[in-house]
Amino acid sequence: MTALALQALILTIITASTPLLLAAIGELVVERSGVLNLGVEGMMVMGAVAGFGAALTTGSPLIEHRRRCRGGALLSVLFAVLTLSLVANQVATGLALTLLGLGLSGLAGERFVGQPGVRLPKLDIPGLTDLPFVGPILFGQDLLVYVSFALVLAVGHVLFRTRLGLIIRAVGDNHGSAHALGYRVIAVRYGCVMFGGACAGLSGGYLSLAYTPQWVENMTAGRGWIALALVVFSSWLPGRVVAGAYLFGAVTILGFYVQGVGIGIPAQFLSALPYLVTIGALVVISRNRLVMRANTPACLGQPFVPDR
């Protein structure tokens, strides 16, 4: 493989991994607060259609980013109201939210099918982008690639170096004790769920404006479920989310690469490869009880009612 081909391969892996990283880092914060949101897929696809529609009608990158965040955050508010205020079952509500998002996005995006999209522009850094080999990889990406890494650093810092992060982890580990100490458990969880929804919206927008600049119904294709699995794979640690997202992104691109060079492996198997790797990774991680017990939020998925 030539250097140019290797560079192109790395660039495609970054493009495939970024939506997984954005969605997973948001869900990690949600689960650290003790909420299990299985509606990531629905929020992603709503962010995808909202971002595509905004780009098509306004052409403004700033408005695109706001609409993407809003598309995912609106569904996350609905999820938060149902599960935190009305104490609905988190698993059932998350699944219903996914179905709702897929249906609503199909309805809202019907008029966008077949229309050419607007690709996110690259943010070249003068003097650095022109560096041989590493320049385009490190300094020639679009804004959301840089945002994804900034979010990982910010989440890691806030969760483990600030008082706010300590409160979030306390709420996720023992919401009863956190409430007894005077912390507003419901308010903290509302904020975390909305942050996760905004990240999922950005992730979906990246799909419709950078990965494949067009709108196709159900274009998330299960990436929301992979993002959920990545949180478990990472043992709820932000740094490991990056490794996991890029591993699964590389597996996805490997499937395309194998098909492109004509190796005799069924295309259906290659398409299913990222999901098979996801299942395998989860089985391996789940068997290590020490790792699972070390970082799993103790109150994950448990409703909190102050008067009970």
Image (cartoon, rainbow, N blue to C red):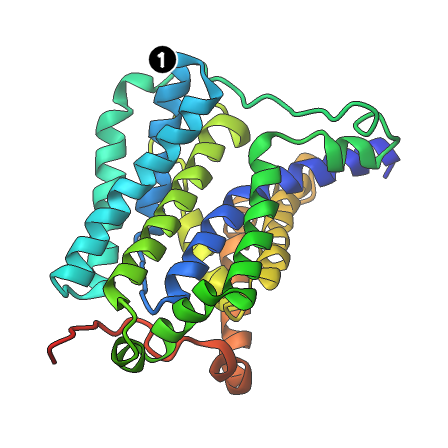
Hey, which residue is sitting farthest front in the picture? 182
Residue bearing mark 1: 57
**From what the image shows, is residue 291 above or below residue 268?**
below
What residue is shown at x 49% (from left), y 80% (from top)? 292
What residue is shown at x 38% (from left), y 33% (from top)? 68
The quarter of the picture where the N terminus appears is top right
Side (left or right) of 61 relative to 4: left
**From what the image shows, is residue 225 above or below residue 185?**
above
Give percent across and percent down for residue 127: 84, 25
Q: Is residue 214 visible?
A: no
Mark 1, Cα crowd under 10 Å, few <14 / some 14-19 / many 20+, is few
Nearer the observer, 208 or 182: 182
Give percent across and percent down for residue 196: 38, 51
Q: Secondary structure at mark 1?
A: helix
Give percent across and percent down for residue 19: 51, 43
Side (left or right) of 14 relative to 21: right
Q: Amino acid at mark 1?
A: Thr
Nearer the observer, 241 or 159: 159
